[in-house]
Amino acid sequence: MPAGDFDCQPALYGSTLKLRALIASDFETLFLAASDPLIWTGHPASDRYERQVFEAYFAARLATRKALAVIDIETAQIVGMSSYYIPPDQPESIAIGYTFLVREKWGGDANRELKRLMLEHAFKVYDTVYFHIGPANLRSQKALLKIGAGHLYDAELNLSGAPALCKCYGLSRAQWLANPKAQQHCVHVP
């Protein structure tokens, strides 16, 4: 399916999170969520908690028209962001990335739910979903392994305006379907 036919900004609902299209008025709330320096430790853009750096990042993500705000259903607060994008080395495919969550949502159900929601949506169209992680971002690499993704290869890719080394992971629909634990509580609302 051509990338233009895939809805990169769907409304997705889980048991604790909802995802919706990122909009310009989300900036202040999202910056508040992103302003914790520990979120960006091990990330290639370790200074993204600084307002000027985050402004450029937010503007770039907003301009793609593929970014999603991640909202905690109970508090109605934005707790992070993620995005679908076309991998530069796999132009007929889809990837999930540019993801961050507030630390209170780390290491538990929220990250898995976020990935479940996005994967279920992507697997309606694509057989494999890709992820590109900085070599030093061990936290994200471990999170991908927990949902069943496998390391495929390393490549130098231009994902954010400059070529950088990435660890490339993939998760096929078959791998996903073989892992029912990772799929629990995933609901899509059109």
Image (cartoon, grey):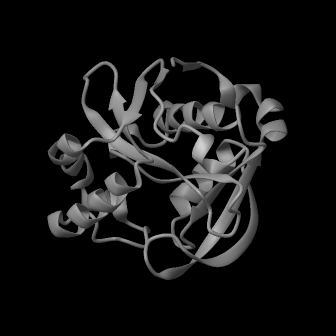
Residue sitting at x 80%, y 30%? 177
- Foreground residue, 84 or 135? 84
Q: How many marks?
A: 0
Q: Is residue 173 left or right of residue 35?
A: right
Using the rendered view, name the quadrant where residue 80 is placed.
top left
Looking at the image, residue 187 lies above or below residue 117: above
Residue 92, given in percent of the width and then of the height, sits at 71, 56
Residue 63, given in percent of the width and then of the height, sits at 34, 56
Residue sitting at x 67%, y 77%? 155
Q: Quadrant of the N terminus?
A: top right
Residue sitting at x 26%, y 62%? 37
Residue 35, given in percent of the width and then of the height, sits at 21, 55
Q: Is residue 60 left or right of residue 184?
A: left
Residue 59, given in percent of the width and then of the height, sits at 27, 59
Using the rendered view, name the quadrant where residue 126 is placed.
top right
Residue sitting at x 33%, y 62%? 60
Q: Is residue 98 left or right of residue 71?
A: right
- Foreground residue, 49 or 83? 83
Using the rendered view, name the quadrant where residue 72 is placed.
top left
Looking at the image, residue 27 lies above or below residue 50: above
